[in-house]
Amino acid sequence: MKKRSKKKKMQCCFNGRARCHSGGCIYGLGFLGSVIYYISTATGFWVGVLGILKSIVWPAFLVFEIMKYLGM
C-alpha cells in the first residue's frame, strides 16, 4: 500500500468541499428552532406530530414565502 505525503493529505482535505458543510449547521439550527416553535404552539398530540413533519421541510416553506413576497 502506497503512503501519501502530508502535503497530499492536506490537499485532499481542503479541495473546496470542506467549506460547503456550513449549510447543514444552518439547516440544523433552523430545524431545532422550528420544532420548538411548532411544539410550543401545538394544541394537541397530532398537531405536534404535524409540526415535527413541517420542521423537516421548513426550507420549502421559506422559499415559497420569499417567492410569494417577491411576486414570482
Image (cartoon, rainbow, N blue to C red):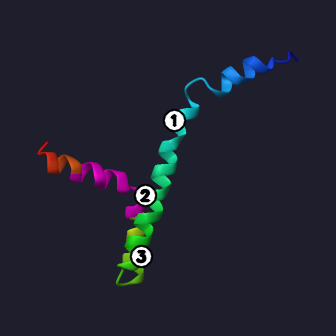
Q: Work out whether mark 1 precedes mark 2 in sequence or the reverse, and give the earlier one.
A: 1
Q: CA–CA distance between discs 1 and 2?
A: 17 Å
Secondary structure under the numbered disc 1 in the rendered image: helix
| Residue type pointed to by label 1 | Cys
Q: Nearer the viewer, residue 64 or 45?
A: 64
Q: Work out whether mark 3 precedes mark 1 in sequence or the reverse, and give the earlier one.
A: 1
Where residue 59 appears, x then y in whole percent?
A: 35, 51
- Write down the quadrant of residue 16 in the picture: top right
The residue shown at (38%, 84%) is: 44
Residue bearing the label numbered 3: 39
Where residue 11 appears, x then y in whole percent?
A: 67, 20
Q: Residue furthest bottom?
A: 44
Q: Work out whether mark 2 precedes mark 3 in sequence or the reverse, and give the earlier one.
A: 2
- Residue contact between numbered discs 3 and 1, judged by CB atoms under 8 Å: no
The residue shown at (36%, 57%) is: 58
Q: Which mark is residue 40?
A: none
- Residue contact between numbered discs 1 and 2, judged by CB atoms under 8 Å: no
| Residue type pointed to by label 3 | Ile
Q: CA–CA distance between discs 2 and 3?
A: 14 Å
